Image (cartoon, grey):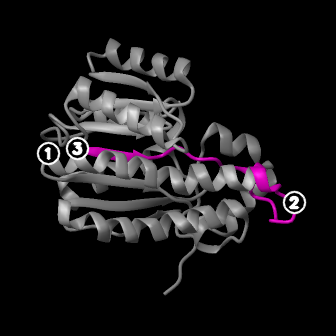
Amino acid sequence: MMSPVRFDGPMRFEGKIAFITGGAIGFGRAFAEALAREGAAVVIADVDTATAASTVAALAADDRRALAVECDVADEAQVERAVAQTVDDFGGVDVLINNAGLHLLEYNQPFAVLDRAKLRRLLDVNVVGIVNCTMACRASMAARGGGAVLNIASMAGHLSTTPYAVSKLAVRGLTVALATELAPDSIRVNAVSPGLMATENAIADLPQELVDQFVNHTQLVRRLGQMDDIVKAMLYLCSEDASFVTGETLRVTGGYPLYL
């Protein structure tokens, strides 16, 4: 069980509203918990409405403001409805975290192996989903004086050549494009590329021998990445601490891969 990130000083997200896709479990839930502890109201946008409601209940039990909304990021109309509900209930959006995505070994196959229906779904969720959510939140963010968007990429998008990796390479490109397009509205757009992380899904999906080889012989930091490593990067990039940072992808990978 991960230990919560500890905060010192004033809460950085007091009065802010954060819309988190794929927020019911994993990184999304960890992001929601961290932002709520720093004063934000959080919206858990997920296709798994039951688990989203459970996450909201846990946050509410700690006196956090939270809302669950059904949201398939690949469905533009559903995204628009989810954002409209957020605006109606909470007043707007200040922080958008594009966390929802398809991943792991199912999509880390050659293009000749992955059937076209799965490929289209992968790109619809991992790439078009970011566009849908960002465009849906733009007007509210602009009306509130600006905001921060964080996209979740992957170290695979820096080196690998699978369909999943290509989708995450596209996330890096989208981060630059959207940072440019949204700059006139004072909206910053950045991304995080996690490395090999000690999440239940990742560890269950990979042979232990492969994990040990990667940590001990490929990374520079000889430990598995932890959820808190990504949470801390998120808090920085979404806060005013990073007010001069936009269009960037921050690798949190234990030093893999390094290149100039």
Q: How far across and how far down the image is residue 124, in percent? A: 60, 52
| Residue to which mark 3 is pinned | 140
Q: How far across and how far down the image is residue 46, in percent? A: 50, 31
Q: Residues within 10 Å of mark 1 (few under 14, many from 20)?
A: some
**In the picture, residue 110 is in which quadrant?**
bottom right
Disc 3 from disc 1: Cα separation: 6 Å
Of residues 106 and 227, the one drawn nearer to the viewer in this rendering: 106
Residue 231 makes an appearance in the image: no
User: Is residue 109 on the magenta stretch?
Assistant: yes
Mark 3 or mark 2: name the one nearer the start of the chain: 2
Q: How far across and how far down the image is residue 192, in percent? A: 44, 59
- On residue 113, the disc is 2
The segment highlighted magenta reads 94-117
Q: Residue at x 36, y 52 (%)?
A: 135
Q: How far across and how far down the image is residue 148, in percent? A: 27, 53
Above or below residue 159? Residue 51 is above
> Mark 2 belongs to which amino acid?
Val
- Judged from the image, the secondary structure of the residue bearing numbered disc 1 is loop
Above or below residue 65? Residue 74 is below
Q: Residues within 10 Å of mark 3 (few under 14, many from 20)?
A: many
